[in-house]
C-alpha cells in the first residue's frame, strides 16, 4: 500500500492502529485503496480537524512560540537556542585563532542558527580578554554578490575587527551565474587572511558544495585547519533543544513525547527543521501548559508535520490562488544540477507576474492575489518575508512536502530554462537593454518551447519578446540576403550557360573542321594504305557526323582490305618463303616471323622491318612451334641442341632455357609466369617458373591424337587435355585436382586453344559441345555457361576485356565485365557478333 500511495509504511500502520491522528493525504490513501468516496471522507476529515481547532485554549493565542518552526534562530532568539553550547564554544575558539573560518554541514543541520543565535551573541558580549568587534555584518551572496555587497565588504573604522558572517555561501554556485564575479567575491573575502585587513570572515556552506569550494585554490588553502563540521545532535543535546525552550516560557513537554521524538530524530541528518516544525505545530495544539503526544500526532509527527501544514494551507486556497501559490513556490527554488535542489531568495517585485496566455492551467493573476498568497504562506511559516525579499523558510520544505517535490520534478527542465531567462533579462536591463545581450539561436528556441504559456515577470516577457523580434528581423535580413544571392547565382548560371553554349558551338565547329580534314586524308590514302584509310574514316566519323565523314565511312566499308603487302627494307637473307612461323604480338602492332635460322619483326603501322636477328640455335621443324608470350616481347623457341629457349625480342638475347625435349614439334604454352612444353617421347609435361627460374617437377601427359594445354596467368594452374576430359594440376603443390569433379569437365575436342584460363586465374574456360563452360578449379563448380555451337578455340584478348571464340566460319566475342580481379562468372553474356 505504501508503494501504491507514496505514504510511509509506518505512517499508514500508525494511522490504522489509532496511534496517531492521520493527515488528510493518509486518509485519502486508505479511501482510494479501499474504493471509498474521496469527497465524503475528505469532508469528514475537515469536520474533525475544524472541531479540534475550535477547542478552547487556556492561554492567549498571541503568545510567542518557543520554537522557530522552519525558520532559523536569529540573534534575538539566543535565549531559546539550546543544545549547541559545545559546538558554539569550539566555533568561537576557531574564529578567534583564524581570520577566515568555515562551518560545513548538511542541509537541516542548523548552520544558520549556529552562526546567528550561537556565535553572534557571544561576539557581542565578549569576555574581558577579547576586544569588541567594530561591526558585525550578516549577509548572503545572492545572484550578484560583489555588486550587492561591495560596501559591506569594507572594514569599519574602529579599534576592533569587522566581522563578516556569510550565510548560505553555496548561493555563489547556485544563484551567481558569472564565474568572474564569483571569483572576485571570494578573493575579496580572502583578504581577511591578511592580519592588517581588520576583517574576520566566517562562512556557512552546505556540505555537498565542499567540492565546488575546492575549485578555488586560495579558498582551499584558507579552509585548511579553519573548518568546523556540524553533524547530528546527540540525544542529550536534542533533549535540551526539545525541553528547554518550552521551560523558558513556562511550558512542559510530556516525557513520553520527548522520548518519542528522540527515537525518531536521533542520528538522522538534516532532521532539526523537521523537529522544530513539529514542535511548533504541537505547541499550537497544546492543552494548557503541556505539549502532549496527542497534539504531536495531530500535527502529523516529525516526518509528516511539514507536509500536513503545507497541505492544509494549499487546501485552504481557491483554485486560482492554489495555482498562484505553485508559481510562487517554484520561483523560490533553484533546481540542482548534480546536487540537491536549493532555495532561491527573490525580490518581491519578481513575483508580480506579467499577464500572459491564460488557460485553465494558467489563469490570470493580479498583484493583490500575490500578496494574499504570500501572506498565507508566511503565516504558516512556509516562507519568510524580509525587507522586500521572499525566501523559503527552509530547504527542508523541498524534500518534506511531496507535492512540491512533484512540481519540481515535473518542471525541472523548465525551471532551469526559466532561471537562466531571469538572469539574462536582468543582465540585459542592467546593460541598458543592449541588443547584443538578447537571446538568439538555440537559447531562444529553448526558452520559447519550455516557457510557452508560463507566467513571466514584465521584464522577462519584454526581454523574450525583444529577442523574438530581433530574430524575426535577422530572418528578414537573411531572407533578403539569400534572395539577392539567389538572383546573382541565377544570373551567373545564365551567363555561364550562354558562355558554355558558345564554347560548345565553337568546339563542335572545330571538331567538324578537323573531321572533314581527316576524312579528306582518308580518301587520299584509300588505295595506297587501305587499312589506315579505314581507321581514319572511322575516327573522322566519331569526331563529327557530317556529310563528308559519313561519305568517307561508307567508302571505307566498300573498300576491300589488302591481305598481303610487300615488306620494304627486308634484308637479303629473306626469301619470302612459307617455311616460317608468323605470330601476331599481344598488342596487335607487330608480326613476328620465325624461320629455321632467323627471327624477324615487322611493324604493321609503318610496314617496316624493326628486327632481323639470327635465331638462338637451330630451331625444330623450321620454327613452326615458336610461341609469342602474352607480353609481346618474349618468344619461346624450341631448338634442336639446347631445348626451349626464351628469347627477348628487344635485346635479341636468351633469358631462360627449359630442358631439351625430344619431340620434333612439341606443344608449347608460354604464360605470364610459366613456360610449359609437352614431350610426346617421354610422356611428360616439362614446366619452368619464369619469375624464380625454378623447374617444376614433371607432370604425366597421357598421349592422344589431339591435345591442348593452358596455364593460368598467376602460374598456379595447368590444364592438359589429350582426349575429351582435361586434367587440372595445382603447380604450387604439384598435385592433380580431385578426379570426382574434373571428370565432368568435358571438352568438345582437345585441339589447340580449346582451353583458356581467365585473366584473374580463378576460372578455366573449356570449349564444350554446345558452347563454352567456365569452371572454378578450386571448388569444382561450373560458374557460367555461354551457349554457342560449332566452336573449337577460345582465348582472352590482349587487353583482357573480351572473350573470343572461333569455329569453322564463326568468330564470337563476349565482353568481359572485369579485367583481372573478378571471377569469370561475372562475364557479360552480351555477345558481339
Image (spheres, grey):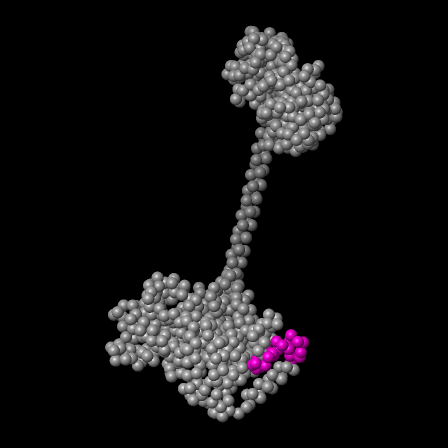
Q: Is residue 285 visible?
A: yes
Task: Give the residue displayed 41% in from the left and 77% down from the top.
Answer: 237
Secondary structure character of the magenta stretch overall: helix
Vertical placement of residue 793 versus 110, above or below = above
Q: Residue 477, position in %: x, y?
A: 51, 60
Q: Which quarter of the rendering shows the N terminus? A: bottom right
The part of the chain drawn in magenta is 16-39
Report if residue 294 lies within the magenta region: no
Q: Which quarter of the rendering shows the C terminus? A: top right
- Left/right placement of residue 29 relative to residue 277 reads right
Task: Give the residue displayed 74% in from the left and 24% down from the top.
Answer: 769
- Left/right placement of residue 330 relative to residue 92 reads right
Report if residue 25 lies within the magenta region: yes
Q: Residue 442, position in %: x, y?
A: 51, 61
Task: Give the residue displayed 52% in from the left and 76% down from the top.
Answer: 303
Q: Viewer-proximal residue, 597 or 530? A: 597
Q: Residue 587, position in %: x, y?
A: 58, 22
Vertical placement of residue 515 versus 57, above or below = above
Q: Is residue 313 visible?
A: no
Q: Viewer-proximal residue, 23 or 719? A: 23
Vertical placement of residue 287 versus 719, above or below = below
- Left/right placement of residue 82 relative to residue 637 reads left
What number of labels is visible?
Answer: 0
Q: Residue 530, position in %: x, y?
A: 63, 19
Vertical placement of residue 730 versus 227, above or below = above
Task: Give the residue displayed 50% in from the left and 78% down from the top.
Answer: 302
Q: Viewer-proximal residue, 795 or 129? A: 129
Amino acid at each position: 500500500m505504501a508503494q501504491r500511495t507514496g505514504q510511509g509504511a509506518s505512517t499508514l500502520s500508525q494511522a490504522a492502529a489509532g496511534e496517531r491522528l492521520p493527515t488528510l493525504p493518509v486518509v485519502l490513501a486508505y479511501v482510494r485503496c479501499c474504493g471509498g468516496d474521496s469527497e465524503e471522507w475528505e469532508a469528514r476529515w475537515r469536520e474533525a480537524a475544524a472541531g479540534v481547532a475550535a477547542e478552547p485554549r487556556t492561554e492567549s493565542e498571541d503568545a510567542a512560540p518557543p520554537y522557530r518552526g522552519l525558520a532559523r534562530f536569529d540573534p534575538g532568539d539566543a535565549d531559546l537556542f539550546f543544545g549547541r553550547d559545545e559546538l558554539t564554544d569550539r566555533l568561537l575558539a576557531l574564529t578567534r585563532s583564524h581570520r577566515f573560518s568555515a562551518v560545513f554541514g548538511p542541509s537541516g543541520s542548523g548552520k544558520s542558527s549556529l552562526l546567528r543565535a550561537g556565535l553572534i551573541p557571544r561576539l557581542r558580549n565578549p569576555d574581558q580578554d577579547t576586544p569588541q568587534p567594530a561591526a558585525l555584518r550578516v549577509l548572503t551572496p545572492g545572484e550578484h554578490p560583489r555588486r550587492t555587497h561591495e560596501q559591506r565588504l569594507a572594514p569599519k573604522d574602529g579599534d576592533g575587527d569587522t566581522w563578516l558572517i556569510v550565510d548560505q555561501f553555496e548561493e555563489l554556485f547556485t544563484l551567481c551565474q558569472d564565474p568572474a564575479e564569483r571569483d572576485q567575491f571570494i578573493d575579496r573575502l580572502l583578504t581577511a587572511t591578511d592580519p592588517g585587513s581588520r576583517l574576520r570572515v566566517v562562512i556557512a556552506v552546505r556540505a555537498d558544495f565542499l567540492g565546488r569550494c575546492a575549485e578555488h585554490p586560495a579558498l582551499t588553502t584558507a579552509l585548511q585547519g579553519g573548518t568546523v563540521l556540524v553533524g547530528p545532535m546527540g540525544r542529550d543535546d536534542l533533549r535540551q533543544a526539545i525541553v528547554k525552550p518550552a521551560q523558558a516560557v513556562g511550558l512542559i513537554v510530556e516525557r513520553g513525547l520527548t522520548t518519542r521524538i528522540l527515537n525518531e530524530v536521533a542520528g538522522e541528518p538534516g532532521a532539526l527543521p523537521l523537529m522544530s516544525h513539529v514542535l511548533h505545530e504541537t505547541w499550537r495544539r497544546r492543552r494548557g501548559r503541556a505539549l502532549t503526544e496527542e497534539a504531536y500526532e495531530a500535527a502529523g509527527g516529525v516526518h509528516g508535520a511539514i507536509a500536513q501544514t503545507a497541505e492544509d494551507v494549499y487546501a485552504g486556497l481557491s483554485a486560482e490562488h492554489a495555482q498562484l501559490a505553485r508559481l510562487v513556490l517554484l520561483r523560490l527554488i533553484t533546481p540542482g544540477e548534480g546536487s540537491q535542489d536549493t532555495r532561491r531568495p527573490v525580490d518581491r517585485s519578481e513575483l508580480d507576474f506579467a499577464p500572459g496566455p491564460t488557460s485553465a492551467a494558467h489563469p490570470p493573476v493580479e498583484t493583490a492575489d500575490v500578496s494574499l498568497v504570500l501572506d498565507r504562506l508566511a503565516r504558516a511559516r512556509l516562507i519568510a518575508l524580509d525587507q522586500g525579499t521572499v525566501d523559503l523558510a527552509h530547504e527542508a520544505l523541498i524534500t518534506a512536502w511531496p507535492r512540491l517535490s512533484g512540481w519540481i520534478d515535473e518542471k525541472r527542465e523548465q525551471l532551469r530554462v526559466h532561471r537562466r531567462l531571469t538572469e539574462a533579462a536582468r543582465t540585459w536591463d542592467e546593460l541598458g537593454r543592449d541588443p547584443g545581450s538578447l537571446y538568439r539561436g538555440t537559447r531562444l528556441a529553448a526558452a520559447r518551447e519550455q516557457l510557452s504559456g508560463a507566467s513571466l515577470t514584465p521584464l522577462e516577457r519584454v526581454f523574450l519578446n525583444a529577442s523574438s523580434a530581433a530574430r524575426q528581423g535577422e530572418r528578414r535580413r537573411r531572407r533578403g540576403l539569400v534572395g539577392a544571392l539567389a538572383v546573382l547565382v541565377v544570373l551567373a548560371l545564365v551567363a555561364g550557360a550562354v558562355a558554355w553554349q558558345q564554347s560548345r558551338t565553337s568546339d563542335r565547329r572545330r571538331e567538324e573542321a578537323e573531321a572533314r580534314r581527316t576524312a579528306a586524308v582518308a580518301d587520299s590514302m584509300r588505295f595506297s594504305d587501305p587499312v589506315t584509310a579505314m581507321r581514319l574514316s572511322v575516327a573522322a566519323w566519331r569526331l563529327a557526323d557530317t556529310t563528308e565523314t559519313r561519305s568517307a565511312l561508307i567508302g571505307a566499308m566498300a573498300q576491300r582490305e589488302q591481305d598481303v603487302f610487300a615488306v620494304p627494307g627486308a634484308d637479303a637473307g629473306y626469301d619470302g618463303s612459307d617455311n616460317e612461323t608468323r605470330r601476331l604480338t599481344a598488342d596487335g602492332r607487330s608480326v613476328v616471323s620465325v624461320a629455321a635460322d632467323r627471327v624477324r619483326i615487322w611493324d604493321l603501322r609503318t610496314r617496316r622491318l624493326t628486327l632481323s636477328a639470327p635465331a638462338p640455335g637451330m630451331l625444330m621443324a623450321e620454327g613452326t612451334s615458336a610461341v609469342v608470350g602474352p607480353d609481346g616481347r618474349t618468344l619461346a623457341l624450341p631448338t634442336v641442341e639446347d631445348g626451349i629457349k626464351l628469347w627477348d625480342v628487344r635485346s635479341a638475347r636468351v633469358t631462360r632455357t627449359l630442358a631439351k625435349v625430344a619431340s620434333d614439334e612439341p606443344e608449347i604454352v608460354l604464360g605470364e609466369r610459366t613456360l610449359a612444353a609437352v614431350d610426346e617421347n617421354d610422356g611428360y609435361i616439362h614446366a619452368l617458373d619464369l619469375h624464380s627460374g625454378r623447374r617444376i617437377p614433371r607432370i604425366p601427359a597421357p598421349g592422344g591424337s589431339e591435345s591442348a594445354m593452358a596455364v593460368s596467368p598467376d602460374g598456379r594452374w595447368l590444364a592438359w587435355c589429350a582426349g575429351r576430359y582435361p586434367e587440372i594440376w595445382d603447380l604450387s603443390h604439384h598435385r592433380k585436382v580431385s578426379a570426382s569433379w574434373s571428370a565432368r569437365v568435358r571438352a568438345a575436342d582437345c585441339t589447340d586453344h580449346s582451353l583458356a584460363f581467365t585473366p584473374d586465374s580463378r576460372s578455366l574456360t573449356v570449349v564444350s559441345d554446345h558452347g563454352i563452360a567456365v569452371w572454378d578449379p578450386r571448388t569444382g563448380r561450373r560458374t557460367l555457361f555461354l551457349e554457342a555451337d560449332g566452336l573449337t578455340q577460345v582465348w582472352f584478348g590482349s587487353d583482357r576485356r573480351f572473350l573470343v571464340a572461333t569455329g569453322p566460319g564463326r568468330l564470337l566475342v563476349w565482353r568481359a565485365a572485369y579485367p583481372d580481379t573478378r571471377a569469370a562468372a561475372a562475364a557479360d553474356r552480351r555477345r558481339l557478333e
